[in-house]
Amino acid sequence: MDSSALATAIHAYKRDTTAESDDLVDGRRFLTDETKHFERLLGSDLPRLRQLQGEEQEEELVRSYVAEVVKAGDFKYACTLPVLKSDQDAFHFHMIYATRHIRGVEVFKQTERSVIPFMHEARAKAQERRRVAQSGQYSLLPPEAKYKERRFAEFQLRNLEIAKNELIKMLRASEQVLFDDAWAKVMQHSAVMENDFRGWLSEWKSSSSLIFVNLDPGQKLPRKDAGQFLKWIER
């Protein structure tokens, strides 16, 4: 994903938020249609997905689809990012990016850090425009002060919990884990940032649940491309 592709994605979101289009075709509506052959897209997970509902079904559908993309393309990593509709507290679409190199994950997370605040800023301005159109009155407060949003915040909390639990499982399953692999495992989760990951490591280190291996003198936390490891200590 190069800079021109990122600029195109951001421009597309800016265009959609001003147009406030509702033309998105929601794939969830077709999951119960037995005539649709979703097995090619979702694999053996399709029966389970059909039993789910609402936001849980949407999020699990994306996870299953991404897993099939990784398998079909022999990719090593895959990142996603949901983009909110401008006029509804719901996701408009999910950006999906698969790569065979950890550098691709780094670039996507850099993009994510830029797109998320941009998305909320654009939605706050859209909400302000609607308030003014309905009331005819302008507010002295900036649009962000009255911004309302639930969907992404709850999605982020769920992903943080999932990423944290997967990391613990990964650490417990091996004698020691290369820091780069642990970083990539966590960073593939949407809305989970490096500060979250490093915060967990610091917390576990302080509680003597985790040991850092092969750090340089004076180094507090591991870094990528340095042959440094994480070792989980069962207590």
Image (cartoon, rainbow, N blue to C red):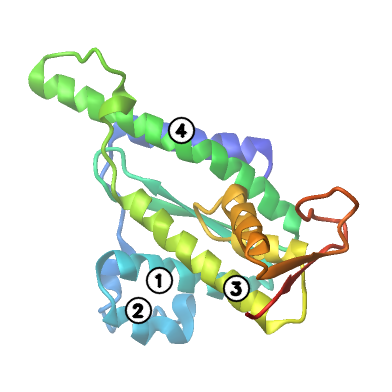
The mark nearer the N terminus, 1 or 2, is: 2
Q: Nearer the viewer, residue 213 or 59?
A: 213
Q: Which residue is mark 1?
A: 60
Circle 4: element type = helix
Residue at the extreme right of the image, as rendered: 217
The amino acid at mark 2 is: Leu
Pointer 2 or 3: first along the chain: 2
Label 4 amino acid? Phe
* First of labels 4, 1 by sequence position: 1
Mark 1 or 3: in front is 3
Q: Position of residue 235 (x, y in %)?
A: 63, 80
Q: Which residue is mark 2?
A: 49
- Contact, mark 4 vs mark 3 (Cβ under 8 Å): no
User: Which residue is located at x 24 percent, y 44 percent?
Assistant: 88
Whether residue 155 can be seen here: yes
Camera-nearest label, 4 or 3: 3
Residue beneath label 3, please? Answer: 168
Q: Nearer the viewer, mark 4 or mark 2?
A: 4
Asked whether residue 15 appears in the rendered view, the answer is: no
Sequence order check, earlier mark of 1 and 3:
1
Q: CA distance from mark 1 to mark 2?
A: 7 Å
Q: Would you say the residues marked 1 and 2 are in contact, meaning their CB atoms lie under 8 Å apart?
A: yes
Q: Which residue is mark 4?
A: 118
